[in-house]
Image: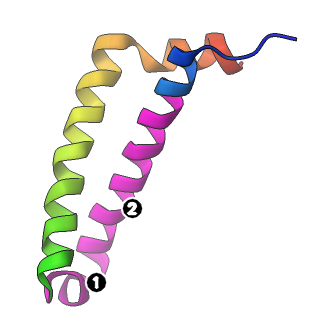
Amino acid sequence: MNTPSLRGYGAAITVGVAVLSMGIIALGFIIPNRLFESTVGLVAFLLAGLLIVVCAVLANIYDLRGIIHDEFG
């Protein structure tokens, strides 16, 4: 039985962070009044925007789709 390597788990965590960031960004468009009425919501939205860009860059550099397919598929 093959167990996924550390790069497989790293790729899965990167995709998970991207999905979580996407959800926070979507909340900014769905309920902007509730999200932006506090400093915590604004910081979360801006941090999610930064994280989604970092995840996109990592996905393009390291071919996360191929890594996930090789390790888990």
- Compared to residue 7, the image places residue 39 above or below, namely below
- Compared to residue 10, the image places residue 36 above or below, namely below
Q: In the rendered image, which quarter is residue 39 located in?
A: bottom left
In magenta segment, residue 32: yes
Side (left or right) of 8 relative to 13: right
- Residue type pointed to by label 1: Ile
Q: Which residue is mark 1?
A: 31
Q: Which residue is mark 2?
A: 23
- Compared to residue 36, the image places residue 29 above or below, namely above
Q: In the rendered image, which quarter is residue 38 located in?
A: bottom left
Give the residues in magenta. 11-37
Q: CA distance from mark 2 to mark 1?
A: 12 Å
Task: Report x, y in % for residue 70.
Answer: 63, 10
Image quadrant where one finds the C terminus:
top right
In magenta segment, residue 23: yes
Q: Point out which mark residue 21 bears.
A: none
Side (left or right) of 51 relative to 8: left
Mark 2 residue element: helix
Image quadrant where one finds the N terminus:
top right
- Residue type pointed to by label 2: Gly
| Residue neighbourhood size for the residue with mark 2, other residues' Cα within 10 Å, grouped as few (<14), some (14–19), many (≥20) | few
